[in-house]
Image (cartoon, rainbow, N blue to C red):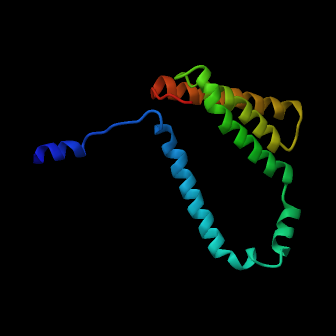
Amino acid sequence: MKGEAVAELTKVTIDFETSHLLFPTLIACVLGFLGLLILIRERRSLAGSGAYWAEIFSKMDKLRFFGTIVLTLVYFSLMVPVGDIWPNTGLGFLLCSIPFVLLSGLLFLHEHGLKPVATVAAAAIVIPTLVWWLFTEVFFLTLP
């Protein structure tokens, strides 16, 4: 009886339908906790007359801020549906990461000459491809 209870402690089962949600959930919880700490620490300035927010909103780079939010939401929203077309190949990650890295790089690029754009385009192709290869061939992990 006692041996069976100990054996149950070392038994590991993985639900592959939901196992990929572990790290995003963990990260969301950490970010939520940190956001709550910021709200508590900055409660006086946040609850002020609105001048605080008006100053921040007037100084911020709205195109890059909102562009990054939109790109990130589209990237994560499309990765699984694209990956479902070719299951267990990681092509959802690869085919969504290349345009995401390219568009993010172009969004934050200050000079749009041929050399900087070519550098961003090369990085957008090489880096996600290298990560995809590393995870699939070296670590034998499937990506969405």
Outermost residue, left side: 1
Q: Quadrant of residue 41?
A: bottom right
Horizontal placement of 134 versus 103: left or right? left
The x, y position of residue 112, in whole percent, is: 88, 37
Task: Determine whether 125 is above or below 73 in the image.
Answer: above
Horizontal placement of 63 versus 101: left or right? right
For the point 84% across and 31% down, which residue is it? 115
For the point 89% across and 34% down, which residue is it? 113
The x, y position of residue 32, in whole percent, is: 59, 60
- Counting labels gives 0
The x, y position of residue 10, in whole percent, is: 24, 43
Q: Quadrant of residue 98?
A: top right
For the point 56% across and 63% down, which residue is it? 33
Q: Is residue 129 among what the camera can see?
A: no
For the point 86% across and 69% down, which residue is it? 54
Horizontal placement of 8 versus 90: left or right? left
Q: Is residue 27 among what the camera can see?
A: yes
Task: Please identify the quadrant where the C terminus is shown.
Answer: top right
The x, y position of residue 78, in whole percent, is: 68, 33
- Towards the viewer: 122 or 144: 144
- Towards the viewer: 11 or 42: 11
Q: Quadrant of residue 59?
A: bottom right
